[in-house]
Amino acid sequence: MYDFAIIGAGVTGSGIARALSRYKGLVCLIEKGEDVASGASKANSGIIHGGYAAKYGSLKGRLNVLGNRMFEDLNKQLNFGYRKRGGMVLGFDNVDLASLNELMSNGIKNGVLAMKIIERDEILKIDPNLNPKVKYALYAKDVGVVSPYEYTIALAENAVENGTELFLNSEVINIVQKDNSFEIITDKETIRSRTVINAAGVYADKISYMAGVDYFKIIPKKGQYILFQKGTGASVNSVVFQVPTELGKGILVTSTYHGNLMLGPNSEEVEEREGTYTDEPTLEYIIDAAKKSLPEFDLKKRLKTFSGIRPASSTGDFIIKEEFPGFINAAGIESPGLTSSPAIAEMVVGIIKKNRDLTEKKYFDPYRKAIIKPNNFSLAELNRRIMLDPGRDKIICRCERVTEGEILDALSRNISVKTRKGVKMRTRAGMGTCQGKFCSPRVDKVIESLKI
Ligand SMILES: Cc1cc2nc3c(=O)[nH]c(=O)nc-3n(C[C@H](O)[C@H](O)[C@H](O)COP(=O)(O)OP(=O)(O)OC[C@H]3O[C@@H](n4cnc5c(N)ncnc54)[C@H](O)[C@@H]3O)c2cc1C
């Protein structure tokens, strides 16, 4: 019998699992995908939002600001890769300026500290490639970027390191309450737990319904992106937003944590909860809209397109509460859910503490080593170093300079997903310009070598 069973190993569930693994009690994390980060947590903008956009008085507004402040320390512990870049919301006329002022006063009420309205000269000093027609911007210093799937993997690995049991490929199909506990029925087995925490992303309404709580619905909202080759991210120094509309935060121009220029996302209500394809008319719209912020980018360097689906709630806000004793919803976690995730996890711990004692474990290890060890060597230099010292690693993925050692490290972790996709999310092998044409067979060989 588990004390806590968390359904869904996205950033919400993995964050909660890690936070609970600090305490005595048995924790399990149940995920229907073959890996963690199978839903929205693998395909989003990766922005650690400043906290001025989410409405004051909402859970989103409060948790965004709290979460943002936790990332620096969290990254020191978990080494997933996070960088503060600063963010700007651009304004082109006085109507936009009014919106920027509204955003700023909302941010002040939310508790955002480092924000100011700046004008054209200062904007172009920070980001010289932006549209010279820009007049104003709301500048927020604490906006950052992360690699969202590496962050989710890091949370889950650390939770497992601290005793959480992870069930992958296990889809929850029913929940039955029995006396003072729950039977969580998956397509594989029945798992018993005293407490159930629903962090099932776009399926959170279905899971909640299984437990008899049906006052909200998840409205899936898709966002599409265009990603450019590594290095192209150097064309912008900050995370560049446009004035938000009723459709969301507007089209964003940013560098990813790993240095790829990224444009997107749009926001479109969709029926299907998992279709993540893209379509040309939307991509053209994104390109046109992005040009308003960054007039020049080289479409020949377009690497790939992708999309993610936001698990928006019909209530308009995050739903984080104990619905009845033992059943907690962490549902409707759309943007800024990635940013809020460490604060959501603490909030869930707080909810649990209200009704039961949680005792800290004597040994909780908050640290996790990085898999990707960034180096700034050119490929030629890297090969020269390997020639000089053949005992050193060999390069498996040339585009992203991933070494065999990094792949072996990824495959020998406590969550070892022995697939190309698992290796790709952990090491970036296959994410480069050739999109895996060169390295895929070599990655397969390393995976095979471990199966012997
Ligand atoms: C286009 C887009 C852009 C975004 N940009 C940002 C951003 O820049 N900054 C930010 O802060 N936030 C952003 N977000 C929001 C952020 O991505 C989400 O809030 C966050 O990833 C939600 O995490 P989650 O764990 O709640 O859901 P998910 O990541 O979807 O995880 C839910 C998990 O539950 C599993 N699951 C579902 N049903 C079952 C079942 N029956 N049994 C077992 N497992 C199940 C799924 O497989 C999935 O892995 C964005 C989202 C999108 C889509």
Image (cartoon, helix red, strand yellow):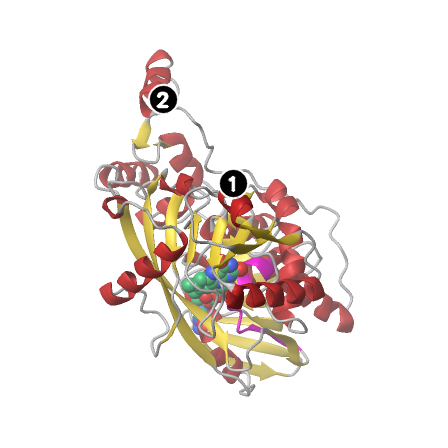
> Does any portion of residue 9 appear in the rendered image?
no
Q: Residue at x 44, y 44 (%)?
A: 236
For image coordinates 50% across by 46% down, the residue present is 414
User: Which mark identifies residue 382?
Assistant: 2
Q: Is residue 150 magenta?
A: no
What amino acid does circle 2 point to? Leu
Quarter of the rendering occupied by the C terminus = top left
Residue 373 visible within the image? yes
* Of residues 165 and 8, the one drawn nearer to the viewer in this rendering: 8
Q: Residue furthest top?
A: 388
Left or right? Give the position of 91 relative to 22: left
Q: Let me know if residue 327 is in the magenta part.
A: yes
Query: Which residue is pictured at 38% across the width and 46% down the height?
Result: 261
Q: Would you identify the image quadrant in which residue 424 lies?
A: top left
Count of marks placed on residues: 2
Secondary structure under the numbered disc 1 in the rendered image:
helix
**Residue 342: quadrant of the picture:** bottom right
- Give the residues in magenta: 326-341
- Mark 2 element type: helix
Q: Which residue is mark 1?
A: 125
Q: Position of residue 168 (x, y in %)?
A: 44, 60
Q: In this picture, is 200 found above or below 84?
A: below
Q: Work out whether mark 2 precedes mark 1 in sequence or the reverse, and give the earlier one.
A: 1
Image location of residue 178, percent across then percent down: 60, 83
Q: Nearer the viewer, residue 412 or 64?
A: 64
In the displayed structure image, the side of residue 222 where residue 123 appears, left or right: right
Nearer to us of marks 2 and 1 is: 1
The crowd level at tag 2 (other Cα within 10 Å; few <14, some 14-19, many 20+) is: some
Q: Quadrant of the N terminus?
A: bottom right
Disc 1 Cβ-to-ligand 1 distance below 8 Å: no
Rendered location of residue 410, percent (x, y): 43, 40
